[in-house]
Amino acid sequence: MAAELGRQNQKVLLTDLDLDAGMVAFITKTKTVYSILDAVNNLHRLDIHYWKALVSNGIPGVEIVASPLALASKIRPTDDQIRHVLAFARPHYDWTLVDLGRSLSRMALSALEEVDEVCLVTTLEVPALHQSKQIVQTLLDSGYGKNRIRLILNRAPKRLDITPGELEKMLGLPIYASVPNDYPELYETYAEGRMLSRNSELGRQIARLALKLAGMEPDKSGKKRFGLFG
């Protein structure tokens, strides 16, 4: 989605806050030795010049801040540090995309205070639905507005065994978007060390999802109409 927004002449920041198993650097082939921890540990000198030294520019229109190279980092940022870094970076981009990992950690909850909308990605497997329901309830209990949560069904089969209405009743949210299952395309993408092709069906669906989230809709002339949430 970050790459697609970059193609729309938007200035995008992609931040990996999954400190245990972050995959952004691998998927984007980012080579930088710096990570989000370098920003956190240098708040006293954090200005735009220092920031530009931390980010990677491997994708047109997208700047990337990766998670630490060593998994299970022993250094855990505080809530205030995470919010400080996100608040600093935000005014310098049209869009900031943050990967919060696969669970709702304390750090993720603190980061959400700087996030306008959250995309909750799930599959139809029972454990995934169970965890998604717990995450939704935790977000609502913490005061995060229901209208700010976007439920995305990943690896969706062509025919669902459960109706959208049943899924909404189970999780308390409507399905915002569905992404089809395409293991062969993803396998080739990762094996060849490239980004997902926009010409594949999965690539087209991801592109549509990015434009929908950004409020960009094609007008009758075929040109894009831009709308930013702020």
Image (cartoon, rainbow, N blue to C red):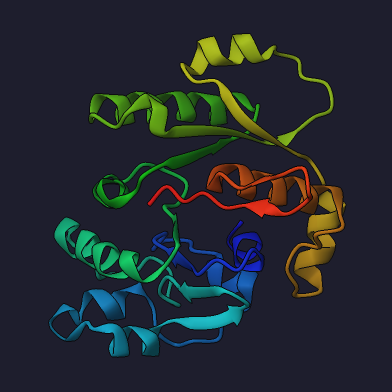
Q: Residue 217 in the image: x percent, y percent?
A: 65, 44
At x 78% / y 57%, what residue is drawn?
Answer: 186
Which residue is painted at 45% across and 52% down in the image? 101
**Residue 214 as seen in the image, left or right of residue 100:** right
Q: Position of residue 152 (x, y in %)?
A: 59, 35
Q: Nearer the viewer, residue 125 or 116?
A: 116
Looking at the picture, does residue 209 appear above or below residue 17?
A: above
Side (left or right) of 147 relative to 105: right
Image position of 155 with respect to 126: above or below:
below
Q: Is residue 169 above or below residue 117?
A: above
Q: Is residue 128 left or right of residue 83?
A: right
Q: Is residue 205 above or below residue 190?
A: above
> Looking at the image, which residue is at 63% across and 77% down?
60
Q: Quadrant of the N terminus?
A: bottom right
Where does residue 48 sit, x and y in percent of width and height? 29, 84
Instruction: Say left or right for 76 vs 157.
Output: left
* Residue ranking furthest to the front: 221
Residue 12 x, y percent position in the rendering: 50, 67
Examine the image and state in which quarter residue 181 appears. top right
User: Can residue 80 be seen here?
Assistant: yes
The answer, for residue 76, to whether it is visible in the render is no
Which residue is at 15% across, 59% downward? 80
